Image (spheres, rainbow, N blue to C red):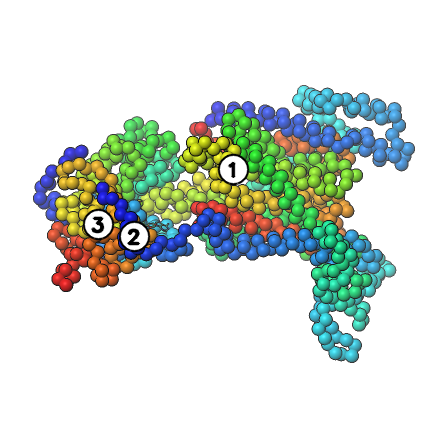
Amino acid sequence: MLQFLIRRIAYMIPTVFLVSVVTFAIIQLPPGDYLDTLAAELADAGGLDEGTRQALADQYGLGQPIWVQYLKWMRGILFHWDFGISFEKNVPVNDLIWDRLGWTFAISILTLLFIWMTALPIGIYSAVKKYSVGDYVATFFGFIGLAVPNFLLALVMMYVAFKYFGQSVGGLVSPEYIDQPWTWDKVVDLLKHIWMPIVVVGTSGAAALIRIMRANLLDELYRPYVVTARAKGMSEFQLLMRYPVRVALNPFVSTIGWILPTLVSGEIIVAVVMNLPTTGPLLLRALLVQDMYLAGSLILIVSLLTVLGTLISDLLLAWIDPRIRYQ
Amino acid sequence: MTPLTPMPSDAILKPTHLPLVEIRDLRTHFFTDDGVVKAVEGVDLDVHANRTLCILGESGCGKSIMARSMLRIVDSPGRIVDGSITYRAADGRTVDLAKARLGSKELRGIRGQDIAMIFQEPMSSLGPITKIGKQITETLLLHRKITKAEAKEIAIEMLNKVGIPNPAERYEAYPFELSGGMRQRAMIAMALSCEPRLLIADEPTTALDVTTQAQILDLIAELKDELAMGVMLITHDLGVVAEVAEDVAVMYMGRVVEKGDVYSIFENPQHPYTQALLKSVPRIGGERRRRLPAIRGMVPHPLARPSGCPFRTRCDHAMAGVCDVEVPELTEVGGSQVACFLHDTEVANG
Amino acid sequence: MSAIDHSPAAIADAPAAPILLGPWALMWRKFKRHRIAYASLWLVGFIYVLALFGNFFAPQAHDETNRRGIFVPPQAIQFIHRAEDGSARLQLHVDALRMKVDQATMRRSYEAREGEIIPLGFFVKGHPYQLLGFIKADRHFFGPKNPDDVAYFLGSDRLGRDILSRIIIGTQISMSIGLVGVAVSLVIGVSLGGISGYYGGWIDNVIQRVIEFLRSIPTIPLWMGLAAAIPLGWPPLRTYFIVTLIVSMIGWTSLAREVRGKFLSLRNEDFITAARLDGLSDWEVIRKHMVPSFSSHIIASLTLAVPLMILAETSLSFLGIGLQPPIVSWGTLLKEAQNVRTIIEAPWLLIAPGTMIVIAVLALNFLGDGLRDAADPHAQ
Ligand SMILES: Nc1ncnc2c1ncn2[C@@H]1O[C@H](COP(=O)(O)OP(=O)(O)OP(=O)(O)O)[C@@H](O)[C@H]1O
Ligand SMILES: [Mg+2]
């Protein structure tokens, strides 16, 4: 197991390196840089004078070869835990991102739990009672869940919440609680809000997992070993849980690997629509104004944390499935 | 293998006490999209305690489905549509397994505890990610009121008995860590852990090499004597039949066409199908281990059962106007029962 | 051993076995039994026809603005027209509308004009367009009989443009992005997956790592980064192709995995070994023996990839970093419904394109699912 762990972590290193390079390449892609954006914005006020421009360029190392900029950025992160500075807000990236990243991952992980709690039982039910009314209902909602894009669902739910329940829309807490210290009331208010992004982000994942679980289990349900267990005299529920479900669970667990990135993706886009204080709106804004260190840091950290999540899911899988562990 | 030596005469005689299982007119059909496959179509059979019954027949003739029907583990779209399977419990009560409600306590109590089964595919019949030991103790804990530690003790002893070296270590092994032969032994240990009264073994040795085959068959025979259980052994191997069987039933297209004790069948086969099957065995005591020989023509498609006697399309003695009209019933001829109009006195007399 | 007798007499007596069907015919038969999938096939076909002849089906010019028709709610089509003298006759029509502005609240509302209607008909004359891009025409499938009238069957937007027409025109972009993206995925996925699975070894390793890498980073931030790099000034066509490329970047990985898996399992099959022993080259083996044995699976996977790409495009355009107006796609249409206030004032801006997306994606999913089930020989 330890060997497996070491091997998996070793595999991660090139991935992490690639992620950082790709991230940096992406934020460098747009022609021009933040100074151009700034100049354009200040055009009415007479533009950016050459002296200021030069000072700023020197300060941020703009205009140097890309790989020098990359190395500078990386050195800052690795040795000083310094992700650079947000051009637009003129504060260190560190001051802006961690709260928001925290919320993004909190929502993503809560969503994962939500997905598991719904997909597992429904998927099992659907497979065991294949072609029953319940299976058709689950399948139907599964398809709908997959077909409705996250942002559309978010809009619809906001519309419904506003129109029929008069609930304040957007954000994680009601406006009056923003910037207030945490109190019991604020927590309750948070719970009233946070379920919506969780459900919105989780629906398509849950729909996908229901179908995966159903298909996995259907694959296993008619295997000889299930008949063996039945011939032993076990009750249907007992043998279902001890044999086919356990086996079907493996591919199911391995889905965390890819579902986590989609959840983070979904959270980002839903956050934009619902105006949540998470990574999404910040990233979108940073990309649009070419606030490159901010955008790059966000993409980098979100990707890294996702890679880490995938690693955890792999370890979990090896823990459940002896066949993988012993390879 | 040792040649068959004549057994003491009382062993050949039919046992006088009541059979363990009586199958009467059993019909198990598969309702597929293409039509109804009559996998078992009117089987009559008795299984006795402390005797080994061998079921013979070509691939696809319904042996496995018949055996599975006895435990009610036929997968859909298969269903028992008619007939009875009367099981006589140790206390003399009888249960009709064919009518028992699926999932009922009664049926579950019989499965694994009274009737145990070893399956055709040793590779896939064990749960893939559950330890061998757990799979054995599970059965024990299900049917007996014992502690986990006791169950473990019994399981290890059982693994030892079926000839698995290092049983205490193997107890913790996963199926994929064992060879095919070891897995089959583990299956047997699992099946026998509750000391069943009837063991159904569906081609338990097909996937194994000859030496392992012999060992496993010896093992089953040994355990049969020790526990005085009935054994129903499904096989294609005439050598095996000659060696271990006391009773033989020959099946063709879902029906028993001939049954009797091993001597009557081997020395004096009555049904043309049995005769054809045995043709390659020149005489008893000669060469043994032989696969079923080819028989003229092909088995008809399961969806296209011939009218009347199902074997008539391949039979050299088929009588037009007789064999294609009615299905022959089993009748007593000599030491065995045969389903063939050649032996039907009414037909023979005209 | 008795010899097997092939004399006709022996066989003629046996009832004939059912006729065996070829693999494609079997698949088709299985597919047709999946009724929802079969209906979806027709629906998808219909949507693509709608896209192909978009101008013909759109009652109005999709970019024609109308200051007197801002945020008109969907108008109901009526069948019976009652004239002033009380006589009634069958006449498809919608009410002619008059805009009223409440001076105090500045809210717009519309009311029917007494006695005035806009008659509707099939194959009516309307604005001129080029069918399929090169045939001059001015007939429209359905719309107001008088080319100067406008009818908003699904309402209008903030510039008085007809939502229905915009959705129909948007179908062209949204549905074709799926197809083009899938074509790109197909080429990359099948070639890389094939190479990976057929040759194995270090090539396989590298490709697998790349795929793992691509799959482990969240798509939306990646797409956002890439899409944000598209200069706003680019011509629409170029933006369209770049967005398609970005969207298909993820799609090919799953296809490549699937193809690789198939190759791996097929590589050791007897019929492949036999073909190789026959002296066929690698390429011939792949083309003649391997690809046919899993092309049905590929078709199913591709069908399932189309809706994913459609959703991706929609999401990006919705965020404002994918396709940009004046390109009309379902995503850019939904962008008009970005905030709750607009939705409350004009819910049709959300409902109409949203429904269209859901229908198209659902149909494609059902279709792909049906194909996959039909392609799987083990599924019942
Ligand atoms: N799930 C099923 N659906 C349809 N028909 C089935 C199914 N399972 C078995 N059959 C049919 O039942 C018949 C009997 O099958 P069975 O498995 O009992 O044969 P068998 O005698 O055990 O053969 P073998 O010696 O090869 O094990 C076969 O003709 C087969 O086509
Ligand atoms: Mg069998």
Dot 3: few (<14), some (14–19), or many (≥20) neighbours within 10 Å? many
Dot 1: few (<14), some (14–19), or many (≥20) neighbours within 10 Å? few
Subunit that carries the residue with mark 2: C
Subunit that carries the residue with mark 1: C
Q: Is mark 1 within 8 Å of ligand 1?
A: no
**Relative to C18, is B313 on the left or the right?**
left
Tag in front: 3 or 1: 1
Tag in front: 2 or 3: 2
- Helix, strand, or loop for circle 2? helix
Q: Which quadrant of the figure contains the N terminus of chain C?
A: top left
Subunit that carries the residue with mark 3: B
- Helix, strand, or loop for circle 1? helix
Please tell me which residue is depicted at 44% across the width and 28% down the height of the picture: A327
Identify which residue, C225 or A107, lies in the foreground.
C225
**Residue A98 rendering spot, x and y as whole percentages:** 68, 32
Q: Amino acid at mark 3?
A: Tyr
Q: Which residue was labeled with disc 3?
A: B273
- Helix, strand, or loop for circle 3? helix
User: Mark number for residue C8?
Assistant: 2
Q: Earlier in the sequence, mark 1 or mark 2?
A: 2
User: Mark number for residue C287?
Assistant: 1
Residue at mark 3 shares a chain with residue at mark 1: no
Q: Is mark 3 within 8 Å of ligand 1?
A: no
Dot 2: few (<14), some (14–19), or many (≥20) neighbours within 10 Å? few
User: Mark number for residue A24?
Assistant: none
Please tell me which residue is depicted at 9% across the width and 41% down the height of the picture: B8
Tag in front: 1 or 2: 2
Q: CA–CA distance between discs 3 and 1? A: 48 Å
Residue at far left of view: B9
**Relative to A137, is B312 on the left or the right?**
left
